Image (cartoon, rainbow, N blue to C red):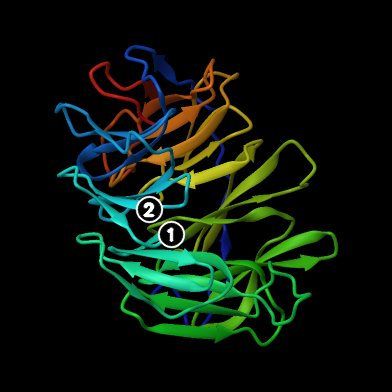
Amino acid sequence: EPFVGERIGPLRREAPLVSEAREASSSRRGRPKNARATAVGTDGMRLDIRCDKGATLVRGRGKPLSLWSAHTLVSAHVAPDGRFAAAQFQDGSIALLEFSTGRTRNVEHRGVPYWVDGTLVIRDGCRNIAVDPRDAAARELAPACGTFAGVGGGALWIAEPPPGPNADPTVASAIVAIAADGSSERVVFTAELPQDPQVSHDGNVLCGLFQRGQQDLLQCRTTRGGRFERVALAVVGGPVFAPDAARLVVRVGDPHATEQDLHLVDFQDRSIRKLGRIAHRRVVFLPGATHVVAYEGDRGLVFAPLTGELLHFGDKTDDWRAVAPIHGTAAGFYATRQGAGNCPDVVRIDLPTGDTSGRDVGRSVVIEDPPAEGPPTQ
């Protein structure tokens, strides 16, 4: 069990990750055209969002399939099993894609889509609608007003603000877990109220920010109860949980400085470790939570805490805008950088081994644009 009773700590402080960053090699062959984002499903199948309208479905060496050519896509969200994606369009409408067949289905409801296990849940104000991706059949779930706090333990978590017209919407007085089967559970905070609470992938850990003078303190507890325990002081931004492990990363330091320290918190082995100093504004875990990618604002970095590797990707002048993990593997990912024109460049970044556990990352990162026969990627 990762927790003893209701406690998440104490957390053991590990030695900082000290590693000289290695340069990445780059290949510019087959540069993708007219793509600004990619969502990657099972078996490496990709939904490439085009810069103009529509998307391209790429499945192995088969002929690419053009989809939704009359519509502008805003985003695409892949289900945890990699079989389906939910595409959201500029007008707010949503459609479902089955990767293996290329079959699409329109969803009658609009809102913000989230995957809760194998069910698509759409948030529309205080309404929560569950959609079966196999036939787009919809049903109402329990209502909840507030802000998104994560998906974990088979539920969508919503942070409810305190009552009253002048209440701070970033503060939570309660948190609600809404399961895809229609059940729900509400946990009320009775002491100090957290700001921007977030829940881990398994629904066991709840973290929030608490103001201490001019600084933000990150504290966590189990969702089952207990008291909040201190994890990090002088936090910049909120925590970023791994989507499939009891780990998070958080930036610590002066919010006005160019760089902050990036810390990895592992609730499974109850440890905290400094990964390094970064000037990036965004971080994301790769599948398995063995690699952390930092991007936007500086040259791309990949941290591999298990092996001690620190890897650069891209040139110093590259402005990375997005990172799309590849379903089921930590052996690579897709990244979007600002291109010369209005359409960004989407490239594939491969870790050299192909080991899906991500435990052996090798000695370098290879950046490779997708092959010429395949359409755009991110």
What residue is at 71 percent from the left and 38 percent from the top? 259
Say few, some or many: other residues with alpha carbon within 10 Å of mark 1 (under 14 / 14 to 19 / 20 or more): some
128 versus 275 height, above or below: below
What residue is at 72 percent from the left and 64 percent from the top? 217
Residue, far right: 213
**Position in image of residue 74 (x %, y %):** 46, 42
Q: Earlier in the sequence, mark 2 or mark 1?
A: 2
Residue 188 seen in the figure = yes
32 versus 361 height, above or below: above
Q: Give, as a three-letter code, the residue at label 2.
A: Ile
Q: Kindly state the secondary structure of the residue where label 1 is placed.
A: loop
Q: Are marks 2 and 1 in contact (CB under 8 Å)?
A: yes
Task: Determine the image quadrant of residue 260.
Answer: top right
**Position in image of residue 374 (x %, y %):** 25, 23
What residue is at 27 percent from the left and 42 percent from the top? 356
Residue 363 seen in the figure = no
The residue indicated by pointer 2 is 94
206 versus 311 height, above or below: below
Nearest the viewer among 176 and 128 is 128
**Position in image of residue 100 (x %, y %):** 16, 44
The residue indicated by pointer 1 is 110
